[in-house]
Amino acid sequence: MQNRRHTPQHEPQDVAPRLTRREQTILELLGDGKRNKEISGELAISERTVKFHVSGLLAKLGATNRTHAVRLGVRRGLIRF
C-alpha cells in the first residue's frame, strides 16, 4: 500500500497570509479593541467598508470571529503588542 500525503485545503495555522496594507491596519486596530465605528472614523472610511475588510481578514486568517483573528494575527507575527 502506498503512503499518500494529504494536501490540506486550508492554509496551515503557522503560515502568515498576505494581507493588504489596509487589512493589516484594520487587524492592528482590532487588536486595540476598536469597534467598526471607531475604525471607520479613524481611517475616514465607511463602516460598510470596515466590515468588508474584516470579512476579508477572517477569511484569509481562517478565523471564526474578530477575537480569533487578532489571536491568529499575533501567533503568526502579523501584529504585536
Image (cartoon, rainbow, N blue to C red):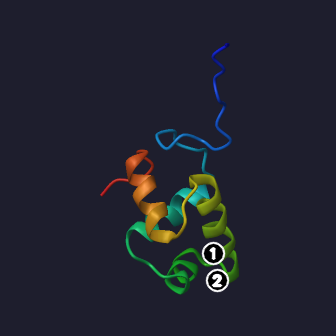
Would you identify the image quadrant in which residue 29 lies? bottom left
Q: At 65% across and 29% down in the image, what residue appears? A: 6
Q: Which mark is residue 1?
A: none
**Is 79 placed above or below 41 here?**
above
Q: Residue furthest left?
A: 81
Note whether 65 is above or below 69 in the view shown. Answer: below
Percent across and percent down for residue 61 are 56, 54
Quarter of the rendering containing residue 4 = top right
Report the residue at 58% width, 55% height from top: 62
| Kind of residue at disc 1 | Val
- Residue 30 location in percent, x, y? 46, 70
Measured in 3D between alpha carbons, the distance from the residue under mark 1 to the one under mark 2, in whole angstroms, is: 5 Å
Residue 22, horizontal then vertical, whole percent? 60, 60
Residue ranking furthest to the bottom: 37
Q: Residues within 10 Å of mark 1 (few under 14, many from 20)?
A: many
Q: Mark 1 highlights which residue?
A: 50
Secondary structure category for the residue under label 1: helix
| Residue 37 lies in quadrant | bottom right
Q: Tag 2, which secondary structure?
A: helix
Say which residue label 2 marks: 47
As drawn, which residue projects farthest toward the front? 1
Residue at 63 percent across and 23 percent down: it is 5
The one of 55 and 29 positioned closer to us in this rendering = 55
- Decide if residue 73 is on the left or right side of residue 21: left
Instruction: Give, as a three-letter code, the residue at label 2.
Output: Glu
